[in-house]
């Protein structure tokens, strides 16, 4: 009994501590923007592969021994850059011989020309025969033709000399080096595989049902996840062969080249999947993802309100929704939404 009275006395003297009520988070500073309306086609996100639309097995037009191999896999080359150089010792020796033959022909021509001049003067005094003059004239013409032939042979050797350097046919990237220094190559033998960096495409298989919605020249957003990069692609058209089993067609989309891009690297493409219609457009920055669901924050009575959305189309910097609760002209948070909580007070710092 005395113990109970002691406890009551302690309860009266000592204050009893109760758990504190949870405090509301302080107002968040946010930036908002308004939802716009635009006519767009709904899109489907499909994954394709990066490829080069123009690839050349670069080969030489003459045979020879490779004395220098400049092609390096992965290197960027300009049109006309030397990929490989062939030995030219025999060509240069032939050119020396032809130059000497030409010099000999020129000397013979000069000699006969002087004879013709002398005979022409003698003819005027009947001191030489017409036959002797005609023989000299015909010989002069023959020597001129012979020198022209030698000139053509020299020109041919000069072309061979130029073609002993195997050059890049366009601006590109070296995909493979096929021959090494010291190897003999015949005419037509490939020394390197080069892909044009100005003809980069994404190839994506799409259902036959979506073919009618793809229009050449239209732009579509392309995302290269491995590079954390987004680019704008342009629809080129279809490869004119459909897959019999999957009933799909391959769509080609042109994209600008970037140094880190690799052939067969995956790329996600937003392709049109329906007819154009009026959709509500909002910035990608307004979208937050929670547990696999997309949401946006609007502001009502000074508090953040969380709204679920279903994205039906994507453009370069925006996404589009079709169904409520998002409406045209609604204010959405585009900056500060990553740390917001539902029903948290907000302070709008910029419209």
Image: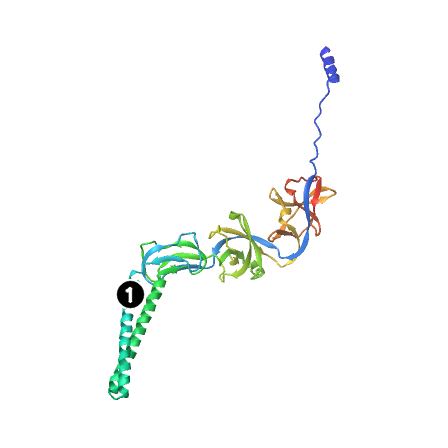
Q: Residues within 10 Å of mark 1 (few under 14, many from 20)?
A: few
- Residue holding disc 1: 96
Farthest residue, direction top: 2
In the image: residue 324, left or right of residue 234: right
Res. 278 in view: no
The vertical placement of 198 against 226, above or below, is below
- Which quarter of the rendered picture does the N terminus lie within? top right
Res. 172 in view: yes
Which image quadrant for residue 113?
bottom left
Residue for point 36% across, 60% down: 165
* Local secondary structure at mark 1: helix
Observer-nearest of 72 and 275: 72
In the image: residue 267, left or right of residue 136: right
Residue 57 image position (x, y, % from top left)? 40, 59
Residue 346 image position (x, y, % from top left)? 70, 41
Which image quadrant for residue 279?
bottom right
Residue 51 image position (x, y, % from top left)? 48, 55
Residue 82 image position (x, y, % from top left)? 39, 58
In the image: residue 153, left or right of residue 332: left
């Amino acid at each position: 009994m005395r113990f109970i009275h002691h406890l009551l006395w302690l309860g009266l003297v000592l204050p009893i501590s109760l758990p504190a009520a949870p405090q509301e988070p302080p107002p968040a500073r946010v930036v908002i923007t308004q939802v716009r309306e635009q006519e767009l086609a709904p899109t489907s996100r499909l994954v394709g592969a990066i490829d080069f639309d123009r690839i050349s097995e670069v080969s030489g037009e003459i045979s020879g021994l490779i004395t220098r191999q400049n092609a390096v896999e992965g290197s960027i080359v300009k049109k006309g850059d030397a990929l490989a150089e062939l030995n030219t010792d025999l060509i240069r020796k032939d050119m020396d011989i032809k130059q000497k033959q030409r010099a000999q022909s020129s000397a013979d021509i000069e000699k006969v020309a002087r004879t013709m001049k002398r005979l022409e003067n003698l003819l005027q005094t009947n001191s030489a025969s017409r036959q002797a003059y005609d023989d000299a004239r015909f010989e002069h013409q023959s020597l001129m033709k012979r020198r022209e032939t030698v000139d053509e042979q020299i020109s041919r050797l000069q072309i061979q000399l130029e073609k002993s350097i195997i050059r890049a046919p366009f601006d590109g990237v070296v995909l493979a080096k096929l021959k090494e220094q010291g190897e003999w190559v015949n005419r037509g033998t490939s020394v390197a595989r080069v892909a044009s960096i100005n003809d980069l495409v994404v190839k994506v298989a799409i259902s036959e049902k979506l073919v009618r919605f793809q229009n050449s020249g239209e732009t579509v957003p392309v995302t290269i996840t491995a590079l954390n990069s987004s680019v704008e692609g342009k629809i080129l058209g279809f490869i004119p062969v459909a897959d019999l089993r999957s009933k799909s067609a391959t769509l080609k989309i042109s994209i600008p080249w970037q140094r880190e891009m690799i052939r067969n690297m995956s790329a996600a493409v937003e392709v049109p999947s329906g007819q154009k219609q009026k959709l509500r457009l909002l910035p990608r920055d307004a979208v937050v993802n929670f547990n696999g669901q997309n949401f946006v924050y609007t502001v009502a009575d000074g508090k953040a309100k969380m709204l679920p959305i279903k994205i039906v189309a994507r453009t370069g910097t925006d996404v589009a929704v079709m169904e409520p609760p998002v409406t045209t002209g609604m204010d959405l948070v585009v900056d500060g939404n990553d740390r917001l909580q539902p029903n948290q007070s907000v302070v709008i710092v910029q419209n």
